Amino acid sequence: MRQVREPNSILSPSAAQQPIWPDPEALRAVVARLAEQPQLVSPRECDRLLDRLAAVARGEAFLLQGGDCAETFAATSPETIGRKVRLLRQMAEILAGSANLPVVTVGRIAGQYAKPRSSPTETRAGATLPSYRGDAVNGQAFTAEARTPDPRRLLQAYGTAADTLAELRKLDERTPSGELGLPSPRTSKSGLSGSEIFTGHEALLLPYEEALCRTDPLTGRRYGTSGHFLWIGERTRNLDGAHVQFASGIGNPIGVKLGPTANSDDVLALIDRLDPDRQPGRLVLITRMGAKKIRDMLPPLVEKVTAESAFVTWVCDPMHGNTFASPGGYKTRLLDDVLDEVTGFFEVHHELGTHPGGVHLELTGEAVTECVGGTPPVHVDDLGRRYETACDPRLNADQALELAAAVGNLARPR
Ligand code: PEP
Ligand code: CO
């Protein structure tokens, strides 16, 4: 049995990127409340996703991950969720048709409420306050009241995730068990793409994640039940850190983001810790190197992992290595850079004979102007028109569909 973090480790000093909660007792009370709540997703659903991801690892399916950088509690109307889900389904159809492979869809949805930050504080006009860390922690407004971490927000995160999941389940095909992730009778013309959507988010706030761990009475295995797919971010993948320890103790499929500082020793050690049984589908390595670095940095990682016969799923996040500030001060990304990184990712895998398993994207179904490019084009000067993200810039629906078509072309059988 793998090591499991004890609930009393909730304020563990080894956990990176945790808010400074001003009232630890209030946090403990919230954690106790969360521990009594029903699971949000079931171990059975997590196992089903694991099976789907095993097919991706074998090269028999493609993974599409997408959604907001930071979901907000406000943007959870059925209409907003419906537009996001429709976009993901359209993208999955396009990809499945071109790649001639089934597409597994995992939203950054129903739990993506917490953000790691490069700086713990933000300074505006001489005033310094804690950084916004996602709706699960504090508010975006630049006031001391909004920015003070409030553990009651963790309960709100749970409730919002539950509401979002209920909406997703409504949008999913009705099944006798009413569970997400069942094979859908509604398939595309190619018969390859179902409508099932799994949920995923960065497992950042360990008190929240640990409070929602449950032991499956059927198997005795422990699962994080806050979402099906949980990933470890670029800033929290330290081998000895609390996030890796947490993930090593649960049965969910796990993702790890790998930025340009990741070396092959780090990656092999992470595989040993997180996937000691080399279980296909268990571990998804999400590279986010940047368009300029992917062709140099990815090959040694893939070669080393392949040489060790580790059976992982390789996924490309072409967003987080390509962010910059526009002259107007908007954090943005060029669709061309995003496309270039995905192209490099496919080139490397085709060259090495490994499966380019999928893409991990930040997108929204809303007609926002946060990333530059596409048709109709968003120009740098347009960014202020509808810039609404709570964190990183997202592709709008037109840009996301254009990207899906391009990825579909790259994924065509060769
Ligand atoms: C994210 O996915 O929003 C994120 C913060 O990514 P990374 O950990 O790769 O920087
Ligand atoms: Co982001």
Image (cartoon, rainbow, N blue to C red):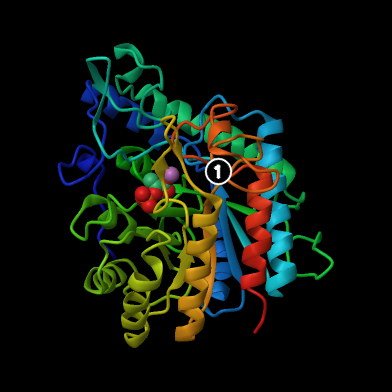
Q: Residue 293 appears at what percent x and percent y?
A: 36, 65
**Image height of 120 relative to 177, above or below:** above
Q: Secondary structure at mark 1?
A: loop
Residue 74 shown left or right of residue 90 in the figure: left
Q: Three-letter amino acid code at disc 1?
A: Val
Q: Residue 40 appears at what percent x and percent y?
A: 52, 43
Category of crowding for the residue at label 1, using alpha-carbon neighbours closer than 10 angstroms: few (below 14), some (14–19), many (at least 20): many
Please state which of residues 94 and 5 is positioned toward the viewer in this rendering. 94
Q: Is residue 367 visible?
A: yes
Q: Residue 186 appears at what percent x and percent y?
A: 81, 59
- In which quadrant is the C terminus drawn? bottom right
**Image height of 262 relative to 363, above or below:** below
Ligand 2 is found in the corner quadrant, namely top left
- Toward which corner of the image does residue 278 lie, by quadrant? bottom left
Q: Is residue 179 visible?
A: no
Q: Residue 374 appears at what percent x and percent y?
A: 64, 48
Q: Residue furthest left?
A: 13
Q: Going 62% across and 57% down the picture, which residue do you hit?
A: 403
Residue 283 shown left or right of residue 234 in the figure: right
Q: Going 58% across and 39% down the picture, which residue do you hit?
A: 379
Residue at mark 1: C-beta within 8 A of ligand 2: no
- In which quadrant is the N terminus drawn? bottom left
Q: Which residue is mark 1?
A: 372
**Count of number-bearing discs:** 1
**Image height of 37 relative to 101, above or below:** above
- Toward which corner of the image does residue 273 lie, by quadrant? bottom left
Q: Going 47% across and 26% down the picture, which residue do you hit?
A: 156
Please state which of residues 202 and 253 is positioned toward the viewer in this rendering. 202
Please state which of residues 150 and 138 is positioned toward the viewer in this rendering. 138
